[in-house]
């Protein structure tokens, strides 16, 4: 029986998903492992007590140092706006704690690198929140690629498109490059870049366009419009080690697209297609099928797959989604902490994605290809 304790630094939007993730581990996977969220740190006393009440967390503080230093907190989960990830994550690792940090790891590539280096020096167990890796259809695609089901991977594309970020959406930290690092590319594209790395390998060269279509936005509740200096749409070409080529695009101004995190992996012998708008399905085409029987087949997530034991009824298509990926992510991470093993995606992965984002922005401003170390 493993009982873990977690402290949240940041109690906003994504904190809710993390609390649901930790809380459901025993319901999904059995009572042998629990993770109690015992404390939350927020920017002010008011926000902290409101978060604590909303999520049923017994203790709160407006000083994250107090949470990080509290001996009753074993795992520190950093959920602040991206420019505020570095300090609590580093302080927690220096204190010997395991650390989860949301994506992208930092707003600046140099900060992400520093976080990764502290993780390496301290040997801290780390996880960066690329939770879509733990959607069962995505894990299945990875296994099928490794098993040679599509042959040699040649062409990968991954998009992350949503439609909430038009001119009426207020100016929050996400729309300031100093706080978010980039716009749609950092917020959504970081997941797609991680997906390319996870499924096809490490990109070595990038060529991107980062475009701003909404140059001004209003602060919440105000009418004056102020500058927004981030990309609303980014489009990227990538060369991947091993020879594959990839395309990534990210947008929060794509009318009709809700959570269109998709990928298509085309190999010499077949193709895999997935979209998060239909998370229970993986589409597979095999060029090895007999000629008269060729066509895409839908593989439905069920008990035969990784994470399948979490299903309430053992019926394929009866349901997995965003929240389930959070439960799977937290459960896998705690398993690594218990075993004293590195978990994936770690801060090393987080830094590599930040390095790609920075190279893509450089490529866009120079209008040229940029090599990635
Ligand atoms: N993996 C995912 O699916 C996913 C989804 C959403 C957001 N995110 C990431 O999670 C992070 C947070 O995003 P969000 O949407 O929850 O943002 P948010 O603005 O809703 O929440 C951030 C919270 O941090 C709090 N905060 C600010 N300063 C603080 C401080 N000094 N100490 C403690 N708390 C402080 C804010 O008051 C706010 O409540 C970002 O890095 C974002 O990219 C990931």
Image (cartoon, helix red, strand yellow):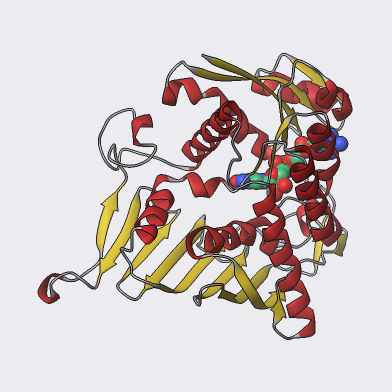
Expressed as whole percent of the image width and height from the top left, the position of residue 339 reads 56, 29
Residue found 34% across the figure and 31% down from its top: 309
Residue 67 appears in the rendering = yes
Q: Nearer the viewer, residue 159 or 75?
A: 75
Above or below 344: residue 178: below
Above or below 44: residue 350: below
- Farthest-out residue, bottom: 368
Q: Say left or right for 135 vs 319.
A: right
Expressed as whole percent of the image width and height from the top left, the position of residue 198 reads 52, 57
Q: Nearer the viewer, residue 332 or 314?
A: 332
Q: Quadrant of residue 285?
A: bottom left
Residue found 50% across the figure and 62% down from its top: 256
Residue 212 appears in the rendering = no
Q: Say left or right for 239 vs 104.
A: left
Q: Quadrant of the C terminus?
A: bottom right
Residue found 61% across the figure and 28% down from its top: 19
Quadrant assignment for ligand 1: top right
Expressed as whole percent of the image width and height from the top left, the position of residue 300 reads 28, 48
Expressed as whole percent of the image width and height from the top left, the position of residue 50 reads 76, 23
Residue found 87% across the figure and 62% down from its top: 226
Q: Say left or right for 50 vs 205.
A: right
- Farthest-out residue, left: 292
Q: Say left or right for 360 vs 333.
A: right
Q: Quadrant of residue 291?
A: bottom left
């Amino acid at each position: 029986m493993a009982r873990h304790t977690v402290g949240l630094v940041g109690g906003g939007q994504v904190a809710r998903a993390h609390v649901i993730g930790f809380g459901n581990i025993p319901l999904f996977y059995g009572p042998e492992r629990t993770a109690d969220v015992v404390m939350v740190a927020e920017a002010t006393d008011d926000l902290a007590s409101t978060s604590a009440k909303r999520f049923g967390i017994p203790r709160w503080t407006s000083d994250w140092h107090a949470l990080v230093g509290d001996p009753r907190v074993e795992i520190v989960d950093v959920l602040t706006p991206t420019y505020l990830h570095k300090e609590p994550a580093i302080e927690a690792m220096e204190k010997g704690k395991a650390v989860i940090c949301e994506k992208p790891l930092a707003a600046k590539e140099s900060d992400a690198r520093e976080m990764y280096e502290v993780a390496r020096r301290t040997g801290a167990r780390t996880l960066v929140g690329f939770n879509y890796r733990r959607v069962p259809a995505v894990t299945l695609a990875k296994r099928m690629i490794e098993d040679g089901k599509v042959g040699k991977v040649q062409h990968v594309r991954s998009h992350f498109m949503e439609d909430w970020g038009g001119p009426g959406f207020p100016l929050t930290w996400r729309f300031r490059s100093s706080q978010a690092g980039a716009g749609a590319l950092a917020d959504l594209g970081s997941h797609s870049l991680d997906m390319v790395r996870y499924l096809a390998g490490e990109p070595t060269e990038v060529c991107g366009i980062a475009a701003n279509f909404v140059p001004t936005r209003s602060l919440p509740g105000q009418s004056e419009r102020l500058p927004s200096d981030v990309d609303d749409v980014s489009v990227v070409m990538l060369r991947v080690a091993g020879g594959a080529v990839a395309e990534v695009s990210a947008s929060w101004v794509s009318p009709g697209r809700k959570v269109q995190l998709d990928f298509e992996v085309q190999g010499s012998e077949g193709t895999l297609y997935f979209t998060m708008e239909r998370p229970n399905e993986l589409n597979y085409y095999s060029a090895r099928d007999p000629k008269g029987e060729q066509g895409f087949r839908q593989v439905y997530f069920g008990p035969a797959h990784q994470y399948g034991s979490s299903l309430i009824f053992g019926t394929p298509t009866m349901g997995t989604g965003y929240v389930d990926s959070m439960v799977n992510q937290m459960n896998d991470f705690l398993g690594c902490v218990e075993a004293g093993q590195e978990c994936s995606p770690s801060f090393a992965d987080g830094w590599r994605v930040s390095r790609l984002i920075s190279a893509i922005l450089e490529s866009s401003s120079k209008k040229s290809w940029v090599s990635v170390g």
